[in-house]
Image (cartoon, rainbow, N blue to C red):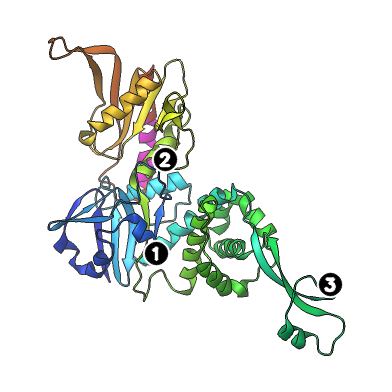
Amino acid sequence: MSRIKIKDNSRIPKESLSDISLLTSKIADKTLEQLEKEGIFVFPEILRDADDITKDQMILQSVNNYYLSSNVMGFMGLGDEKLIIESRFSGNGQDFLFQYLLERVFDVPNIVDLKTDVNNDDRVFNLLVFIFPHYLKSAMRKGVFKTYVRKTYNDSNVKGTIDIARHIVKNTPFVGNVAYSQREYSFDNDLMELIRHTVEFIKYKPYGHKLLAQAKDAVKDVVAVTPNYEMCNRQKIIDANKTNTIRHAYYREYCELQSLCLLILQHQKHQIGMGSKKVYGLLFDGAWLWEEYMNSIVDEIFYHPMNKATKGSQRLFDHNRGLIYPDFISRDSGARVIADAKYKPIDNIGNKDYLQVLAYMFRFDAKKGFYFYPEMGKEEDAVMWLNRGSTYEKNVEAREDICLIKHGFQIPTRIDVYSAFTEQMRCNEIKFLDGILTSVK
């Protein structure tokens, strides 16, 4: 088995990936939209208005003798060839940061050991299972999926199409019943049955009940509308959903949930991608993970508009013009503060980043703005005061009332044990939040 690790946002010599040449030939220079169709599961969903992750983004882009990786982290495979994309902010040879971000953002049990190589496919599979409650709740917010299904009956109250062959088998000699079928608008359909099978499959995992408790109301609704559930029909339900995928734009969340359920349930029959020439994998947008993690720390003092979920949208101009999604807007309207989460080193924050946040500050009458970025060294906060004046009049000077602050979150390094890493991260979260509160006073 060939297994290679690389970092996100890095440059990789092509010869260093020669051991996984079949896999790289399948994924290099292909967009995320193309790879989704080949079995790669991308989280979060790719939306048109998303800034951090787009359909045109590539996992590996060829540039001369190198591959350039992007913001995406995760796992991919093709047969015995495996590629793991770690966070560039991970240290000491262990990608503890990626694991910790997943646990905090998705609120999953601490049982995914990303450094264990007992079975690389099981690691991917565990992550698929852990994000299931999130997708289930997202889909069920639109109500239980309902569609037309054909149901068969054998009684004297004929309402649909008579099934001659089935009638002969079941009603010879004739005793008054007729075998027939009819189309009905029902909650108990192939998709809801697929979700039910996934729920029942997860229940038998050691951590299953704790995981499903995160979506207990949605799980209860799924069980209630699938009275015809039978475990022996699992393969039949899988085949039906593979043939009839959800395509309506309104049910986009159900489409994503359907894909996830198929990946989870098919793992039971054959481990993901094993013995197959099809690429498989699970990818996460690093910038999105970092933003959502920051929100888990500062949510008590900041609003968090979300462009991917189209929630909390703001406008720059009147007549509903200039759609914007600032990452964070302080809840204190009297001394408004704007913050932007950046999954990049401090030296890479500049130019367009400055213009974006300054525009948000001007829109909300904010005197202070923040950049929340991961810090691996010991950089102090960089406070930048906005200039006034012009070089033409030679009167440029720093203002005393408007500033941007680069506020780094310290990422622990040189730690070999995940429990110690977690403990240090918890301490750093307190220090990070205290630094914000001190600055906004």
Q: Is residue 389 visible?
A: yes
The answer to whether residue 301 is left or right of residue 61 is: right
Foreground residue, 132 or 242? 242
For marks 3 and 1, the one nearer the N-term is 1
Q: x%, y% of residue 258? A: 52, 60
**Image quadrant in which you'd find residue 346:** top left
**Amino acid marked by disc 2:** Glu
| Quarter of the C terminus within the rendering | top left
Q: x%, y% of residue 409? A: 32, 34
**Amino acid marked by disc 1:** Gly
Tag 1's secondary structure?
Answer: loop
Q: Tell me the distance, in whole angstroms, between the alpha carbons under discs 2 and 3.
A: 56 Å
Residue at 24%, 38% (x, y): give it. 345
For marks 2 and 3, the one nearer the N-term is 3
Give the label, 2 or 3, closer to the camera: 3
Query: Which residue lies most toward the right here?
Result: 175
Question: Which residue carries the number 3 mark?
Answer: 157
- Give the residues drawn in magenta, as a range: 420-432
Q: Which mark is residue 39?
A: 1
Q: Residues within 10 Å of mark 1 (few under 14, many from 20)?
A: some
Foreground residue, 192 or 372? 192
> Residue 80 in magenta?
no
Q: x%, y% of residue 392? A: 12, 13
Give the label, 3 or 1, closer to the camera: 3
Is the residue 254 above or below the residue 17 in the image? above
Question: Which residue carries the number 2 mark?
Answer: 292
